[in-house]
């Protein structure tokens, strides 16, 4: 080593094979972690699935003037917790009833359509809470056209309880995986630091300050983690987008692929990359400290 070479990539010069092997493992686990994080953020744990199964039904009075049902549905769709609100006229209600209970067409003969129209309201996955449900149902009950609001009050506490448990379990599993991944970072840096302890002593004996060595290696580890985490996030996003496009049914569990480009996901990915860089830098410092302790 001649002149004043940069110490940022000193590990690559001293042990390229070890660093390459560790980097490939890190890329693999970072891609897995990014994939799991994207799935969790899009799905909200079980939020999206439960939101796709839960609906509020506002039964309307009859008769309604033309366009009143559609107009009311548009107003309901404008409420913050609402993802979609669709008006079903009496004829659509009757056809749905026949699909659920076939063979009872005679109920309608001579008596007209016995069923009223209704509005089906679907909530946003992240707004599936008792407060938001109460906001929507209260707004609907204050509308003169609405005769009755069906919100599944009997099953609602159980639904919300399952939502909380599923979310806690999903994030708990992700947190455990993140902990194991952090341990991998630490072990890799510790093993490499011990194996290069002699090289570090050699550099120290030739006037390289210990603080400079530590800061440079930490910076190199952080920069490498940023590159690897960015690559892992891109690979995981591409794989998830392919799966969502290839299997549209997954949207009910995870979400639409278009949301992968939302500001919320972009901010989360940026945080993920910064966390990986911080973890790598700290692990590098701990590894160098272990190397020094091993030489004493």
Image (spheres, rainbow, N blue to C red):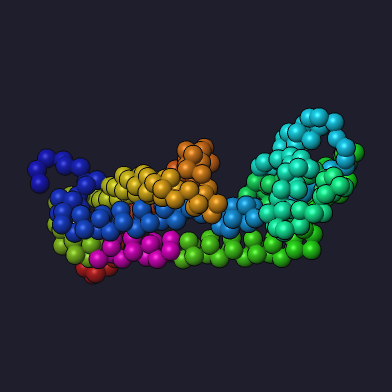
Identified at 68% across, 47% down, the residue is: 123
Quarter where residue 141 is shown: top right
Residue 30 vertical placement versus 64 (above, below): below
* Nearest the eye: 142 or 210: 142
For the stretch drawn in magenta, the main secondary structure is helix
Percent x, y of residue 289:
30, 62
- Viewed as shown, does residue 6 lie left or right of 37? left
Q: Position of residue 104 (x, y in %)?
A: 76, 57
Seen as rendered, the residue at the extreme right is 144
Q: Quadrant of residue 231?
A: top left
Q: Which residue is at a point 28% across and 63% down the rendered structure image?
A: 188
Using the rendered image of the protein, determine whether residue 66 is visible from the camera's viewpoint.
yes
Name the residue at the top extreme.
66
Whether residue 244 sits left or right of residue 280 in the image: it is right
Quadrant, the C terminus: bottom left
x 67%, y 41%: residue: 84
What residue sits 15% from the left and 50% below the top? 13
Residue 105, image x, y percentages = 76, 53
Q: What span is colored magenta in the figure?
A: 177-191
Query: Is residue 183 within the magenta segment?
Result: yes
The residue closer to the viewer here, 142 or 149, is 149
- Point out the residue furthest to the left here: 2
């Amino acid at each position: 080593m001649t002149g004043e070479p940069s110490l940022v990539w000193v590990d690559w010069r001293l042990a390229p094979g070890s660093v390459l092997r560790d980097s490939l493992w890190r890329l693999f686990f970072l891609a897995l972690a990014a994939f799991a994080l994207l799935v969790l953020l899009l799905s909200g744990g079980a939020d999206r699935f439960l939101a796709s199964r839960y609906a509020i039904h506002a039964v309307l009075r009859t008769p309604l003037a033309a366009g009143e049902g559609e107009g009311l549905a548009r107003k309901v769709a404008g409420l913050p917790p609402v993802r979609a609100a669709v008006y079903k006229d009496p004829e659509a209600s009757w056809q749905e009833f026949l699909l659920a209970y076939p063979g009872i067409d005679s109920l309608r003969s001579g008596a007209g359509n016995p069923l009223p129209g209704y509005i089906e309201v679907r909530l946003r996955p992240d707004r599936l809470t008792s407060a938001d449900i109460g906001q929507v149902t209260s707004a609907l009950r204050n509308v003169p056209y609405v005769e009755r609001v069906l919100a599944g009050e009997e099953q609602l506490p159980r639904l919300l309880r399952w939502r909380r448990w599923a979310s806690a379990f999903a994030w708990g599993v992700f947190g455990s995986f993140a902990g194991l991944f952090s341990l991998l970072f630490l072990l890799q840096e510790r093993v490499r630091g011990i194996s290069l302890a002699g090289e570090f002593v050699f550099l120290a004996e030739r006037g390289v300050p210990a603080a400079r060595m530590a800061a440079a290696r930490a910076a190199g580890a952080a920069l490498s983690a940023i590159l690897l985490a960015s690559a892992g996030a891109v690979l995981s996003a591409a794989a998830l987008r392919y799966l969502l496009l290839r299997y549209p049914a997954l949207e009910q569990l995870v979400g639409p692929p278009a949301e992968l480009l939302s500001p919320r996901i972009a901010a989360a990915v940026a945080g993920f990359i910064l966390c990986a860089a911080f973890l790598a830098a700290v692990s590098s410092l701990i590894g160098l400290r272990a190397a020094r302790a091993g030489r004493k």
